[in-house]
Amino acid sequence: MTRIMIILALGGLIYSQASSQPVGLDFYDNLNTLPIIYDNVESYYVSSYDRTGGNDDGFRGTHSQLYIDDQSEHVIFDADGPGCIYNFWFTGSGANLHWGTIKIYIDGQKTPIFEAQDKTLFLGENRPFVEPLVTNGLISSGGFSCSAPIPFQKHLKITTEKSVGFYNIYYQLYKNVEIQSWTPQQDYSGVIDLFQRCGSDPTKNAEHSTVVRSVVRLDPATGRNVTEAGLVSIDEPGTIQSIKINPLFKPDTYTLNHTHLRVYYDGAETPSVDVPIGPLFGSGLGEADVRSLFAGMSSSGTYYCYFPMPFQQSIRITLQNLSHDGGGEYACQVSYTNQLPKTETGALGYFGAKYNCAWPIVDRADYVLFEYQGRGAVLGQVMTVEPVMPDRKRWWEGDLRIYIDGDQKPRFHGTGHEDEYQGGWSTFWLTNPYSLPLFGEPKTENLINVFGQVNGSTTAYRFWPGKIHFKDSIKISTEHGNQNDTPANYSSLVYYYFIP
């Protein structure tokens, strides 16, 4: 349980002198707290990326462990607490891993509190690591992933019997918090329930919510004139709980990338959110089967967005059509309450979403998904890549890089697109789309075999439990190909909360 610290109220927003981020299962227990920004948390990523700047990210095992300890075990994670691992991932050959036994050591104990064989850990046969908390290479297309939170108070060490090849681990460290360290008896039933009912609201809504339903029509844009239709307008403080839309026609990819959702907070004339609805609901390649915890869509049902959106004075949400060809009717539903998320600690942020694109990116520099100056927290991202020509492949070798609060070196450094989105091996990844609660690759298209390796377009998403907090700035970027050597069409959307 976290310790509550002294808070100050300034200008209607709640600030803390030493605030406490909910940790592990507490994060999932009440997702109404998503808009709250905390001071006591920092996010990190450890992976097998090539420290020399090359592309040996796990092929030869050069960087596939932090060190080998005096028991000849390969140490892949070693950190002092308080902290929590939210996700770890490996890839193997086909449906198998080959690194033997994994061991978890808690709080400096010499004996592992848990150990399991690689061949069974991701099959859900080792409690408490059961489905859907774990996925294997046949579920997440080449990736072996675990999303069961593993909190620790003093120290956590994870080892493997042999070199793991490719791997990554996403975790957080905290200040001013007391954590009950993980045991194999951990009860994950609440998170399992959340994951199993993706598509329904994961937050705990207030009892007395208001639902506004409407059918709006967006005509094609003419000249410089675009059409904009209102979904809801509220002139009192509150929180948007969900936004759902259902196109009453068959929208194509162009339409979904040129119809924007716009959110105006507290009487502002400029929208704080102005993004295409395709990526907002999880796909930059048109309609797809997306069933994530926070956003989703399908070709036969309603698109949903469950990010809480608090506002202090008023809010106005609209749909805008920028297309000169597309248009049609949308059945819309917005749920809201006149309550704000409770902020015993932390600062109450506003929801934001930022869309970027480079069609194509040809510079020998990273593609930038998101860059922001100020205070806030990133929750997730959607990224779409389309090759400029069928034979211009291997764009997927590009590494994710996240710089936080002026870091000169990225605090997150990945090993390739399929790895960051928890899949593995480009051809298998591209030919087997998947959609899971926290990550997915819901759609690929225009696949072609280029000298034994498949190339084509893809859209993928990933969410970061606990949120990636930043105090002053953040930059999320990715290479396009090894050392930015492959031009391609990139587009992206990042979900975040910000303090104005």
Image (cartoon, rainbow, N blue to C red):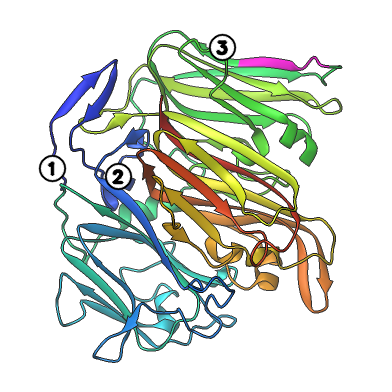
Tag on residue 3?
A: 1
Between circles 2 and 1, the one closer to the viewer is 1
Q: Is residue 288 above or below residue 119?
A: above
For mark 1, give the secondary structure. loop
Q: Of 478 and 497, which appears nearest the observer?
A: 478
- The answer to if 228 sits in the magenta stretch is yes
Q: Which residue is mark 3?
A: 269
Q: Of 416 and 178, which appears nearest the observer?
A: 416
Instruction: Identify the mark nearer the N-term, 2 or 3.
Output: 2
Q: Which residue is mark 2?
A: 29
Q: Tell me if I can see residue 356 in this picture.
A: yes
Which residue type carries mark 1? Answer: Arg
Measured in 3D between alpha carbons, the distance from the residue under mark 3 to the one under mark 1, in whole angstroms, is 40 Å
Which residue type carries mark 2? Answer: Asp
For mark 2, give the secondary structure. helix
Q: Tell me if I can see residue 300 in this picture.
A: no
Q: Which residues are magenta?
A: 224-230
- Give the quarter of the figure containing the C terminus: top left
Q: Which residue corresponds to the image point at 41% horizontal and 51% vertical from the top-left?
A: 407
